[in-house]
Image (cartoon, coloured by chain):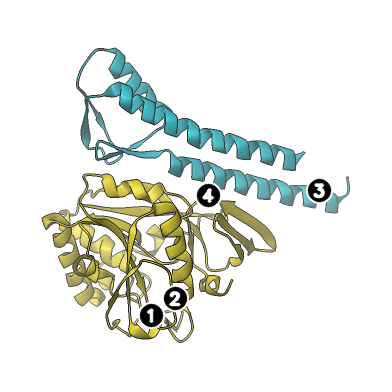
Amino acid sequence: MDISELKKKSDLSYDIAIAKRNALEKAQSRLVVVYNESVFRADAETINLVKTLGESNTSPFYILDTNQNPVEITAPDEFLKILIQRNQEAISSYHQMSKTFARRGD
Amino acid sequence: MKKGVLLFCFDTAEVRYHKILERCVGLVKKNLKLEITVITNFETYKKMKPMGFVNYKFIDPELGNTKLGKEWNNVDRHLAYDLSPYDVTLVMDIDYFPFTDNLRQFLDTGYDFLISKEAYDLTGRQSFDQRRWSMIDMVWATVFVFKKGKKAKRIFDMVKYVKQNYRYFNDMYRIYSKNFRNDYAFAIALQQANGFLHYDTLPIRLPTLPTDCSILEFTDRGVAWRYNNEISYTQDQDVHVLNKEVADV
């Protein structure tokens, strides 16, 4: 492979890396969800916490929102459903984009 | 509770801001589905195309501010509290294009005032690390949400005070840029009003295209841009476009 071809590949890899980063950022924005007048991230940590506390039969329970303010959760099943729905919406969209990047990089 | 979007728009000799507003209003209607009030002057209003149901309030913009040597009529943001007809208001720069409904939910929180502290450079250069340019963390007054009440009023009163004494605060916080910037006026006011401690923020980074990106295409789903001879695009993601040539795309 000559140097010009290598440069082309390098430029393409850079473009793909930036586009992938932007797609991840888009997913991160989409993970933010407002529930019970508070703001949360529907990420793995929140989902695991809500599921664990919900299963521990502690009702109601309290968690921190994105501004570190405590929030009372009285309907964990409802909240968990919203979190999972939003998480999968964002991540599946990112997954679709990732497949496109993989094809471009071949 | 009445909720809506407040937009400020004043044409200048160099930039037809009303063209940018027209794009923004279309996206607010499509994606945020909120009532809109535009703060403008009659000269700008005359040039706007009909945009359906939109409220207008006319003011004479305070003149004298500049950006990169050009007229920049953006110092009236401190009036948002007084001018907004809503109980809960989303204030946006008109060059922030909501290609999603992400911002809509922030009008349903219990918070009195939320603003973003971070921008995300879509070109990958991380060019918005503003900490180097002042002794205070900058906020992005590009997008903020407030609920009318004592706390929000106190913040806006503080913004007015900072604006009146901006040269003093500008020196005190060693802010590099000497022109008036809402971003710093709000950052200073929030710090002062909250006892120099933590204040609540929007947990999002504002996706932003720097001024050296040329906008090539603008659709109802996203934008394509050229930077450094590379063409990129984004869709279904909100974008703050700093290059005002977007008015002519």
Q: Are marks 1 and 4 in contact (CB under 8 Å)?
A: no
**Chain A rendering hue:** cyan
SS for dot 4: loop
Mark in front: 4 vs 3: 4
Q: In the shown orientation, is residue B248 left or right of residue B229?
A: left
Residue in front for this viewpoint, B218 or A54:
B218
Task: Tell which tag, 1 or 4, sits nearer the viewer.
Answer: 1
SS under mark 2: helix
| Residue B123 visible from this viewpoint | yes
CA–CA distance between discs 3 and 1?
Answer: 53 Å
* Residue lying at the far left of the rendered structure: B150
Residue drawn at x 55%, y 74% as measured from the top left: B245
In the depicted view, which residue is nearer to us: B10 or A27? B10
Tag 3 residue: A6
Colour of chain B in the rendered structure image: yellow
Which residue is depicted at the point 13% across and 56% down?
B149
